[in-house]
Image (cartoon, coloured by chain):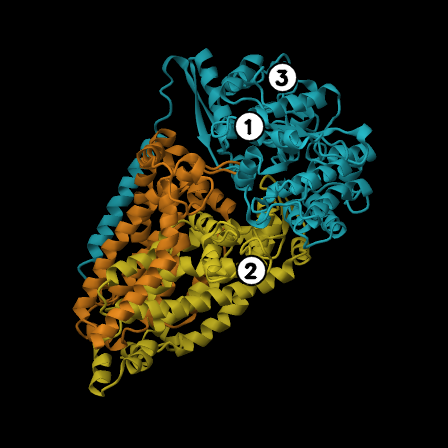
Chain colours: A orange, B cyan, C yellow
Amino acid sequence: MRSFKRAGAEAVALVIATAVFLVPFSFMLLTAVKDDVQSADLDFAWPANWPVVQNFVEVVQARDYVLLRAYLNSTILTVTSVALIVVAAAMAAFVLQRRAGRISAVANFLVLSGLIIPPAIVPTIWLLQAIGLFKTMPGLILVEVAFGLAYAVLLFKAFIAAIPRELDQAAMMDGCGGFTLFFRVIFPLLRPVTITVILTSSVAVFNDFVNPLYFLPGDENATVQVTLYNFQSQYSTQWNLLFMDIVLITIPPLLAFVFFNRKIVAGMTAGAIKG
Amino acid sequence: MKSSPPMLKTAAAVLAIAVLASCGTSGDDEPAAGGSVTLSFLTGSDQSTVDTSKALADAFMKANPDIKIEIENQPGGSEGDNIIKTRLSTGEMSDVFWYNSGSLLQALNPTQTMVDLTGDPVLADVQPDYLPVVSQGGKAFGVPATTLAGGGILYNRKVYERLGLQVPKTWDEFMANNEKIKAANITPVITTFKDTWTSQLFVLSDFYNVQAAAPTFAADYTAGKAKFATTPAAIGGFQHLADVHAKDYVNKGFGSAVLDQGLKMLIEGTGAHYPMLTTLLPAQLATYPQTATDVGFFGLPGDDAAKHGATVWEPAALYIAKTTEHLDAAKKFLAFVASPAGTDAVTAAVRPSGPYRIKGSKLPEDALQVAKDLQVYIDQSATAPALEFLSPIKGPSLEQITVAVGSGLTPPAEGAAQYDQDVEKQAKQLGLAGW
Amino acid sequence: MTRQAESRTGPGPARAGRHGRRPGKTGSPYPYALYLPAAVVYLLIFLVPTVMAFYFALTRWTLFDSTFVGLDNFRDFLAEQNLRVGFQNTLFYAVVTSGLKVVLGLGLGVLLTSRMRLRGFLRAVVFFPVLVSTVAVGITFSALLRPDTGLVNKALAVVGISGPDWLGDATTALLSVALVDVWKGVGLATVIYIAGILSIPQQYYHAVAVDGGTAWHRFRHVTLPLSWPATYSVIILSFIGGLRSFDLIWTMTRGGPGFTSDVIASIIYKQYQAGFFGLSTAGNVLLFLVVTALVVPLNYFLGKRQVAP
């Protein structure tokens, strides 16, 4: 009886999820495989022709294979920025949560400010020019890290609050210093939220198109989001190619998510929540 | 614990690779074999701009094998404006770039940021009456990159033929046509307010009529003396928007319709009139070859049939950034663009939707119908440039205001008054005298 | 000894902090040096340019040159015709989006940490919209919400309801965009909740199980209170996000029809697009003040509840 009810609930969840989340997705897929004319209707009609391969090839070849270069650039940018964000933010959040005082009060305010204040593009360019990092990948990485820190610190801080201080003391008794305490004891415990931060920050960096446009311009340095402009402009849009591009640049991060999701599940079975 | 030090190591390694990679890209400046130079050329990303730029660059490189042109694309619209401003002000502009002429150019501070071409042989073939729209303080900075465009009503000639309609010369005739078109179950006036900029055409292309009624309007408006709300002829455009909405001549779902849909309706004849620019048509030819013959153009009708004419948009231009290190090559390229050989190269790639601004360039036989219609107005000297080519001031919120008026949310007089306020803000931000 | 006392009493007075800085044998358990990497990048790349920008709020700035105009920009921005509507819309948008994200994120988080067979699949499905670029989401939903051919109205027509022009009608535009924002953002709230629920030690559930508690008991007395870090993060992040948000509004309605779905951030963005850089910076300063005035008390209030289990 109970398992019957459960199966029913699962079916309902599945149907709702399909309707709400997969219908828009199927719209994107359908548009991506339509021909030029039909895709301009932007409706849910079944494709009259299926130029799947042709659309795919056209998108990949556009602007001298810019999409492939963009993949490489986006991967380098995302992996590096997110690694730096995770480590720097977790360290900062730890002290911020544990240690009260004037410095932490200021830091707290700065974290909120970082969430609230929109970045100032032109002064940032001046600054990067001054330190010789404008139009370089390290410069763009620093920008992404700086703009992404506040979000990550806030998340880490909230979850560190749930880790009992007794642990710190126990570790100190064992003769751990501050750094060893953090890296050996605290950071491993932050695994669920670390994965969450990795996910959210990766999405933010990977999906960012404003910063690459300003801080690392040029076809050579394009990131995946910038490639959307190949097919879209103020006056005319090749909808089928635009959506093929959207599908192509969304699938790799989706696969990455599925991978990380396994990690979360793995973390779960270690703790085995009873359902 | 186990995860953190390797993670740090990976980060460091990736960073190192990133540094190397970026050194690689910045180091690949042209080897300068045999004194050849590479010009960077920043252009827009919509189809006809891309095609035009590519045609120009390819033809030029064929004629000048020692100069290589690398095209860089960027988004159009206001996001593009800001990228260009940012790059110019931080000294990172490409050698040559494509940008609007008229009021938008003024915001780029050309005297500070671009190479002065006044009196240079580069301009030899440019029609002299074009130069004011690429000038600041009496100095000229650009050459026309494309064709003149008509702004007014694009109409479906098949629909006109079938219903036996005449091209209207007055607003009343236009509305009478709309009534008959509506009776035939065709959308009289295609309206696409999701692409907000398309809503401005009733107001902007009415300028020929404004000028006919108030010849000094442009100068007075720039000086802050003439206002839209207090100039009867200037309210006309707002009134037209409201009339068309009040009579329900617009398509269903006009609030969420987009340009592409509008053009499709027009070309396929499910809509009869579309207030629009002629430049939007060539990009449709690939999909709808009948665009060339089925779509015609007439100027926005005013009150007086004897004073009928059309408002025109001057072509965008190519400019040279002051920071260029290849001035001679850049000038050579611009001189080519502003020559009959250059316009021939463009014609081969994009069928012109209006006449060129280059001496000696002729409209080809197979030019679009709208280009021929526009040429008639030019031959009769019945054209006026849009206000944005005569005055540096164009309020940024016009498109929202015209959507509100055209959706019946704001009365026309109030819309005109709102626009005057918007204009005042713009003038103040430009630091103009008299505001 | 002092150090141990400090860590036991938790957030102590400033005095404790100063003690910690003194060079000692082991140093504080929470050395300020851990701040260093984040602080350097943040101060240099974010804070310095921000302070520079704030100066430009006092100037008429074309990017090429700037003229000092005092507080004129602030006066002009406050005189902006649609600021009032924009302010109301901003609050409405932030409350609706963050409220729904908390409720739906918690619900999905509980569902997706339970032992259901399609858990992995559903997680991927819920998280998918987060990955899709805003532009794509905007185009897709603009198509789905079309008055005539859109799927939403077609579905409504089946049950005999004639749906409105969702995005083209002044009364429904903002709400429609807010719901799409929730669709796009609920995946983030969900993964934060999943992390929150997974961080709850098992003993608490065992304790409830021993007491013979129902599923509702488990949720009410363990999951809900102990996933507080997640709730706190989701509220703060999505509320600030909602107050600042305009990219989806911009792609879907451009603040329209007319000015009816404008929010403060989109008004600022329009100034920026128009090239009024000083004016838009002044708008940003004002928005910063407004958001701070709303968020700091909220943060304080929520932070008080934030206790370790």
Could you tell me if residue B64 is visible in this image? no
In the rendered structure, the residue with mark 1 lies on which chain? B
Name the residue at 45% across, 18% down: B58
Relative to B148, say whether A153 is above or below.
below
Task: Please name the amino acid that badge 2 sits on.
Answer: Thr
- Classify mark 3: residues with Cα within 10 Å, few (<14), some (14-19) or many (20+): many
Mark 3 or 2, closer to the camera: 2
Task: Pinpoint residue C97: horizontal percent, then vertical percent.
Answer: 47, 64
Tell me the residue that label 2 is attached to: C172
How much space separates mark 3 and mark 1, taking CA atoms?
Answer: 25 Å
Residue B358, which numbered label?
3
Please say if the residues under marks 2 and 1 sit with CB atoms less than 8 Å apart: no
Amino acid on which the number 3 mark rests in the picture: Ile
| Kind of residue at disc 1 | Thr
Mark 3 vs 1: CB contact within 8 A: no
Question: In which image quadrant can residue C172 be found?
Answer: bottom right
Query: In the picture, residue A69 is in which quadrant?
Result: top left
Give the mark nearer the N terminus: 3 vs 1.
1
- Subunit under mark 2: C
Q: Provide the chain ID for the residue under circle 3.
A: B
Q: Nearer the viewer, mark 2 or mark 1?
A: 1
- Label 2 secondary element: loop
How far apart are the alpha carbons under marks 3 and 2? Answer: 50 Å
| Residue in view at x 42 percent, y 78 percent | C304
Secondary structure beneath dot 3 equals: loop
Mark number, residue B291: 1
Locate residue B377 relative to residue A166 in the image: left or right.
right
